[in-house]
Image: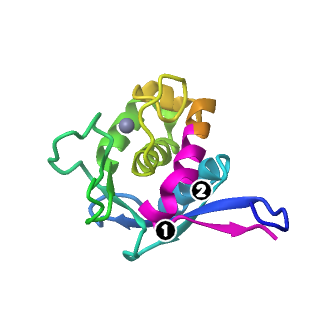
């Protein structure tokens, strides 16, 4: 991107709010952040975590169950996008619902909270559901493919490259030394 030929890494700010009712321990939160950051790093996106609202930040709220909002798909998470871009876009993650599912599906133990968060943040960034096996697939079982489908990655970089600096002030490019 730059004249010096540095690779540009895109950075997004994610404000993470965890309800005291969510039943998620501080170490589980750190684990969630580590896993989510690793999956986004794999798509060339750097996440800066915040614990307060910030201009342009994407907001993720971890609650026991989803709030009663129309259009919330599945029961694990949903994203609310304000098309007028007046209110911040918010993703909700249903920790108690995820924990129940996890208990019945030990394969995803320790990972599902992160996968659902990656998926919902993907929606906040403008990604639609993908038909390809990967984290943006609608089918929860396919979240077990722990990463991006190739098509997700290219859609993500297109979204981020196209108009993000205007639409998402939190997204900016910074050089890698
Ligand atoms: Zn979805």
Q: Quadrant of ligand 1?
A: top left
Left or right side of 46 for 125: left
Image coordinates of residue 139 in percent, x first then y, are 41, 25
Report if residue 169 lies within the magenta region: yes
Residue drawn 42% across and 36% down? 128
Q: Is residue 35 visible?
A: yes
Image coordinates of residue 90 in percent, x first then y, are 32, 58
Q: Where 90 sits versus 54, above or below? A: above
Image coordinates of residue 166 in percent, x first then y, are 45, 64
Left or right side of 122 for 95: left
Query: Within 8 Å: ligand 1 and the Cβ of disc 2?
Result: no
Q: Residues within 10 Å of mark 1 (few under 14, many from 20)?
A: many
Residue drawn 47% across and 41% down? 112
Q: Where 81 sits versus 142, above or below? A: below
User: Which mark is in front, 1 or 2?
Assistant: 1
* Whole-number angstrom distance, CA of label 1 to CA of label 2: 16 Å
Q: SS at mark 1?
A: loop
Q: Is residue 147 visible?
A: no
Residue highlighted by disc 2:
37
Residue drawn 42% across and 32% down? 129
Residue nearest the viewer, comparing 150 with 110: 150
Q: SS at mark 2?
A: helix
Magenta extent? 155-177
Report if residue 161 lies within the magenta region: yes
What number is the disc on residue 170? 1
- Furthest residue toward front: 3
Image coordinates of residue 170 in percent, x first then y, are 49, 68
- Furthest residue toward right: 4
Residue nearest the viewer, comparing 4 with 93: 4
């Amino acid at each position: 991107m730059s004249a010096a030929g540095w690779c540009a890494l895109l950075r997004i700010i994610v404000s993470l709010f965890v309800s005291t009712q969510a039943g998620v321990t501080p170490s589980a939160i750190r684990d969630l952040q580590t896993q989510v950051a690793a999956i986004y790093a794999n798509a060339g996106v750097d996440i800066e975590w915040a614990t307060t609202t910030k201009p342009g930040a994407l907001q993720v709220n971890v609650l026991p169950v989803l709030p009663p909002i129309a259009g919330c798909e599945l029961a694990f998470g949903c994203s609310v996008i304000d098309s007028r871009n007046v209110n911040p876009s918010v993703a909700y993650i249903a920790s108690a619902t995820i924990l129940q599912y996890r208990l019945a599906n030990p394969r995803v133990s320790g990972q599902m909270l992160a996968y659902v968060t990656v998926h919902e943040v993907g929606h906040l960034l403008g990604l639609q559901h993908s038909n390809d096996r990967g984290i943006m697939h609608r089918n929860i079982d396919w979240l077990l493919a722990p990463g991006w489908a190739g098509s997700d990655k290219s859609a993500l970089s297109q979204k981020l490259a196209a108009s993000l600096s205007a639409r998402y002030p939190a997204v900016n490019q910074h050089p890698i030394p």
